[in-house]
Amino acid sequence: MDTKFKINDEIIVDMRSSTGHCRTPAYIRGKKGVVERICGQYPNPEEIALCKSNPEIITLYRCRFKQVDVWDNYSGKVSDTIELEIYEHWLKNA
Amino acid sequence: MTNLKMGPHDVGGEKSIPIDVNDKDMTHWEKFANALRIVVSSKRIITLDELRYHTEALGDKYFEIGYFERNCLSLHNICIQKGIYSLDDFIKIRSRKISEFNVPIIELPDVKDIEHLHNGKPHKHSEKDFQEDESGDGPPDYYFDTLAIAEIFVSKGLITNDDITLKIEQFDNVFPNRGKAVVAKAWHNDSFKKELIHDAKAAISDIGIELETFADIICMPQTDEVHHIVVCTLCSCYPRTLLGMPPSWYKSRSYRSRVVHEPREVLAEFGTIVPINKEIKVHDSNADMRYLILPPRPSNTEGLSEIELSKLVARDYLVGVRLPK
């Protein structure tokens, strides 16, 4: 599978706003992390939600973020992480 | 950051109230609404993303009504928008459904006056001998919506009544036991455990459990060094065909908003104390993966069979909010 990012690549989630249905939560936009694994290719949920007949197929990545990089004043352990799934069109090279 | 929020559903990171950690049993109308939604989406009549989109588009209404009513309203809005039925037809069928519930109230005899025969002799009862057969509230308004929607779908041949009945039964009796069986097998059989962690969907399929889901399953084992916990901040993504219905707290705004930014505090509310020197990994189940947390095998269980072990598996372990003792 030819993917734009590979495991352990440093990425930033795009800081743009969105309209309609989207699976990229606001809290993770603009945050820097690494690719944890490549999940495979899935139809773009933003297009399925609008009933597009041939939604674009996009690579989905699981990305890992340090909690201290996501939240101001995170009070837990420095190595605590949060992992979530981000579609390729929301990721940029860090 | 605030201006990036997508809508009322995008709650990750909000400050919120303590979590009610006790699961609430589902009423029949909640089970019916849930089964209807799952049947409709698993038959691809309406996709999950369409349903989510219309739920998110409810605006202020999102806050005013409960989870199952929201699901029902978004399903109805899509049906109207797609022309699956007309509003006139819906109202007509809904009115008929309501009328079927309009049974006359019968005056019951005074219990003190009830006399019957015991061993051939007249016998009187006192009030304390009687228990009302039925109690509780009647169905909420949205139940008539779901009944009407289901009838229309059945009349168009899109689904059958059996589809819904079967789904309710599976959620009650089949799905909740699958995850427990899988975990018991992993506790019992080390090579299955390795396979489960390596590729959970394949391992589960290999033991004959058909999950009927498009999503992939990822299994994370709890260890002495790392504690895993799962949430869906955007809605209520959960491996339903593996674990059954998500508990009410999993769907709650307080759990969804807080776990991502204060996992230790949230875990403490479930009675799970994770020391500061142990790492916590939060998994936001926000897209196409679903998660199974593999708890450690409880101590002093050597020699137990898989069946015996499965009785020690609690649902809360598999989401990561509690650990076996």
Image (cartoon, helix red, strand yellow):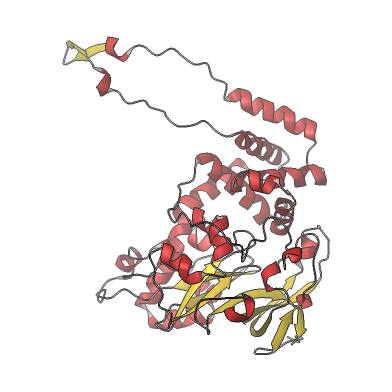
Residue B152 x, y percent position in the rendering: 71, 37
Which residue corresponds to the image point at 79% horizontal and 59% vertical from the top-left? A20
Q: Nearer the viewer, residue B315 or B47?
A: B315
Residue B141 x, y percent position in the rendering: 62, 33
Q: Is residue B73 visible?
A: yes
**Quadrant in which the N terminus of chain B appears:** bottom right
Q: Nearer the viewer, residue B299 or A33?
A: A33
Position of residue B145 in the picture relative to residue B171 (left or right): right
Where B168 falls versus A34 (above or below)?
above
Where B298 falls versus B237 (above or below)?
below
Q: Nearer the viewer, residue B68 or B149?
A: B68
Residue B227 x, y percent position in the rendering: 45, 77
Which residue corresponds to the image point at 81% horizontal and 58% vertical from the top-left? A50
Q: Nearer the viewer, residue B238 or B82?
A: B238
Residue A62 x, y percent position in the rendering: 64, 78
Where A73 falls versus B156 (above or below)?
below
Position of residue B45 in the picture relative to residue B203 (left or right): right
Which residue corresponds to the image point at 41% horizontal and 73% vertical from the top-left? B295
Residue B310, quarter of picture: bottom left
**Quadrant in which the C terminus of chain B appears:** bottom left
